[in-house]
Amino acid sequence: MAYLFGFMTRAGGDTARTRLAAAVAALLTVGAGLGLRATASGDVAKYGGDALYTLLLVALAVVVAPRLTPSRAAAVALAVSWAVEFSQLTGLPAELSRRSTVARLVLGSTFNAPDLLWYAVGAAVGRLVLRRCARGAAGVRADAAHRTLGT
């Protein structure tokens, strides 16, 4: 999976390729979340799902803004996750969740403070994956440059 993000961009990079890789990672993350819901129960399903939710948001942040640094992508995802969790204190997500399965999956229904920690875990994992992939991409580019220059 690390090579999937192997085209993280910096100035002058290929943003279309980065977006595509991030979109594929987002789809894989959704699949992992659905698989977790189908095979696990209890705290593993709940808190693993929380971490995957934020990991999905990291990938979506890169789809929307492929030049984000890994730290910024993780920070955006964490901020959105926490905003959604705190919005559950209003009762609006619970009402929407009663009407729609999609709303229930995206917004949840009940505030649970430990979720905040697991969102941070997902953001940290996303940041680490993006950093590692960015380093891998830099190495791939350097190797290509050496081959082109014959050094």
Image (tube, helix red, strand yellow):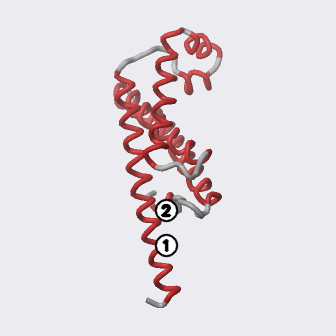
Q: What's the residue type where badge 2 is placed? A: Gly
Q: In which quarter of the image is the C terminus?
A: bottom left
Q: Which residue is drawn at 41% across and 62% down?
A: 135
Residue 65: percent from left, percent from top: 59, 47
Secondary structure found at label 2? loop
How many numbered tags mark residues here? 2
For the N terminus, the image quarter is: bottom left
Q: Which residue is drawn at 38% across and 25% down?
A: 116
Report the mark closest to the observer, 2 or 1. 1
Q: Is residue 66 above or below residue 108?
A: below
Seen as rendered, the residue at the extreme front is: 11
Q: Residue furthest bottom?
A: 150
Q: Which residue is at 61% across, 53% downward?
A: 19
Sequence-wise, the earlier of marks 2 and 1 is 2
Q: Using a 10 Å C-alpha cutoff, classify the residue at mark 1 as few (fewer than 14 neighbours), some (14 to 19) or many (20 or more).
A: some
Across and down, in percent, residue 36 comes to: 44, 37
Disc 1, SS: helix
The vertical placement of 22 against 76, above or below, is below
Front residue of this view, candidates 95 and 82 = 82
- Measured from the top left, where is residue 137 in percent x and y? 47, 65
| Location of mark 2 (residue) | 6
Q: Where is residue 28 in the image (x, y as percent from the top left)?
A: 52, 47
**Residue for point 58% across, 57% down:** 18
Residue that numbered label 1 is attached to: 141
Asked if 124 appears above or below 5 in the picture, the reply is: above
Type of amino acid under label 1: Arg
Name the residue nearer the viewer: 151 or 49.
151
